[in-house]
Amino acid sequence: MKRNLSTGVCVLIALALVAFGLTYGTLTGFGDERAQVEALWSGENGLSDVLSYRGADGLNLCVVARRHLPQDDPDVLILEESAGALRSSGGAAAKKEADTALEAAFEAVARKLESSGSFQASERDQRYLSMLEADLNSLGASQAVDTYYRAASAFNDLLAAPLTGALARLLGVSPCELYE
């Protein structure tokens, strides 16, 4: 009788250790992978910073536009709103939408400025617009977008794996939001 009891206890202890090891290993491994993806989003010079810099360029163009265009110009208002959204905290989908709106509004405001007589008379503002356009294009071509997208997609693919991914999802690990 004692022998069966001690064998049963050993089996239970072994199962508990295996369950603990699987749970701890899964959470630690997926946590580390997710931390790397999140660092590409919110770390220094991560995608969130790049988008914030683009928002700053949009706000700087708003300052120039306020000198030469009507205060209630709809494109300037859209530019200001989308630039503010890029500089605020938010998810990847919201920032992608704001960045798309910023791109279109930036172009529209720049074209309106170029047809404005007072803007044509200001050599300083013309140079500043050229600098802002170059900076916006440079930030748009940044590798941060592709790097984040690849890392987030790879993490989501790992999370979709049949065994370890299912266990991770069961333990509450969620997929990374894609910037698309």
Image: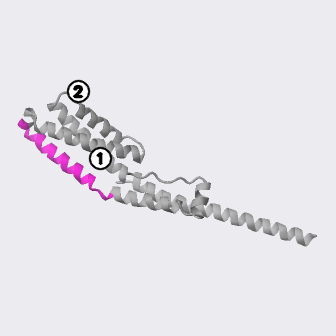
Can you tell which mark lies on residue 72? 2
Tell me the distance, in whole angstroms, between the alpha carbons under discs 1 and 2.
24 Å
Q: Which picture quadrant has residue 43?
A: bottom left
Give the magenta range.
Answer: 120-143
Residue 29 image-quadrant placement: bottom right
Location of residue 8 in the rendering, given as x and y in whole percent from the top left corner: 84, 68
As helix, strand or loop, the secondary structure at mark 2 comes to loop
Q: Position of residue 140 (x, y in %)?
A: 27, 52
Out of 171 and 49, give the one closest to the viewer: 171
Disc 2 residue type (three-letter) = Asp
Count residues near mark 1 (Cα–Cα under 10 Å), then give few for <14, some for 14-19, many for 20+: some
Mark 2, residues whose alpha carbon is within 10 Å: few (<14), some, or many (≥20)? few
Residue for badge 1: 53
Whether residue 106 is visible, yes or no, is yes
Q: Which picture quadrant has residue 109?
A: top left
Magenta stretch: dominant secondary structure? helix
Provide residue 3's location: percent of width, then percent of height: 90, 72
Reply above or below: 146 against 87: below
